[in-house]
Image (spheres, rainbow, N blue to C red):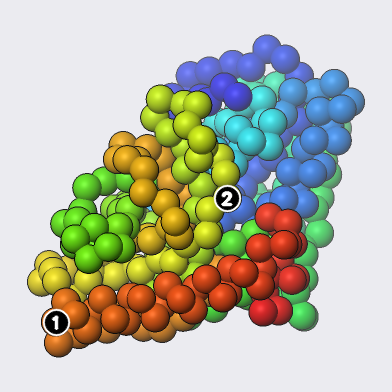
Amino acid sequence: MKIIANTTDFYIEEETAAAIGKFDGFHRGHQKLLGQLRKQQERGLRSVVYTFVPSPAAFFGREMVRELSTLEEKRRIFQNAGVDYLVEYPFYQEIADMEPETYIREVLVGRMHAKCVIAGEDVSYGRHGAGDYRLLQKLAPAYGYDVILIDKVVHEGREVSSTYVREEVGKGNMELAAKLLGSPYQVSGEIIHGRQLGRTIGMPTVNLLPPQDKLLPPKGVYYSQVYLHSREGGMPYDGKRLAAITNIGTKPTVDHRSVMGVETYIYDFDSDVYGDEMEVLLLKYKRPEMRFDGVDALKAQMAADIADGRKFHDKMWLLTDRCLDGILSL
């Protein structure tokens, strides 16, 4: 996959099918759109995913926007999906003020050589977001592209959207979030050194420091799965699904700082993974983060959490990686 980032000065020579969207969270609606993009690849068009960086909401907002998917997570998703080009188009005031037809003529057709444009009903572009799918359809004959409109995916009477996913993650409702996403909500990044308290009490953990703009669920303990990707490659654990239990929070018993971290205990695992990449998939909320009277009390609770986690994972281990209905019925 070729990533075009930090520039508006590019040109794709091949004829393309372009998918437009924010793609925050990459939920089932986004997956439906990407499925149509793959069909256009089969017709001989090169696939392009087009998104803004930063998002318009982040650009215009006065406060930091917490994202369901970080930039690196989106890149990995699209790479794995076989997308040919990812355009991370810089969003700034001049782009925000661009007239919708100018955007279609100069960007979609002029720079991305789009012969097919795929978008949802809520697509918006151009000055004040005035461009919509109707304008895309109206101007298609003049500019020589087809338009494929993707209907909304509905779950139990409500449209699946990034807003819906964000609400459920914010509640710690990881089971419903997984149904909306089509896979468990994840936090990923490079493994860093922690205070290594877990190692001293016989429960070594691996730690992530998520980006500040990453949306995290409520502080607490979660049943999880992890995937590790070694920095050198070829390690036995590379890409394997590993059962784990994860704490999201500030570790109040042992650390008085307020830095949010993601600390994971992987069952029966004790390799040196500092500097490796890790994906943590949050399956189910277990309990809130707590302050204990001391390290002994913390150790006892951790042991109980780990024992409960083993029971949870024993029940689901026979399921395939994406068999969510079975996972979420436990």
Can residue 307 be seen in the rendering of this structure?
A: yes
Is 326 left, or right, of 207 in this rendering? right
- Quarter of the image where the N terminus is located: top right
Q: Is residue 221 above or below residue 279?
A: below
- In percent of the image, x 84 and y 32: which residue is there? 40
Q: Residues within 10 Å of mark 2 (few under 14, many from 20)?
A: some
Picture quarter with the C terminus? bottom right
Give whichever of 139, 220 is nearer the camera.
220
Q: Position of residue 124 (x, y in %)?
A: 62, 52
The residue at the point 51 percent across, 47 percent down is: 227
Above or below, comparing residue 245 to residue 75 in the picture: below
Marks 2 and 1: in contact by CB < 8 Å? no
Give the label on residue 72, or none.
none
Q: Amino acid at mark 2?
A: Arg
Point out the tag, 1 or 2, that comes first from the N-terminus.
Answer: 2
Which residue occupies the extreme bottom position in the image? 293
Is 93 left, or right, of 3 in this rendering?
left
Q: Nearer the viewer, residue 35 or 204?
A: 204
Q: Is residue 151 left or right of residue 250?
A: right
Residue beneath the point at 82% across and 42% down: 36
- SS of the residue at dot 1? loop
Residue shown at 22% from the left, 66% from the top: 201
Q: Which residue is mark 1?
A: 294
Q: How many marks?
A: 2
The residue singled out by tag 2 in the image is 241
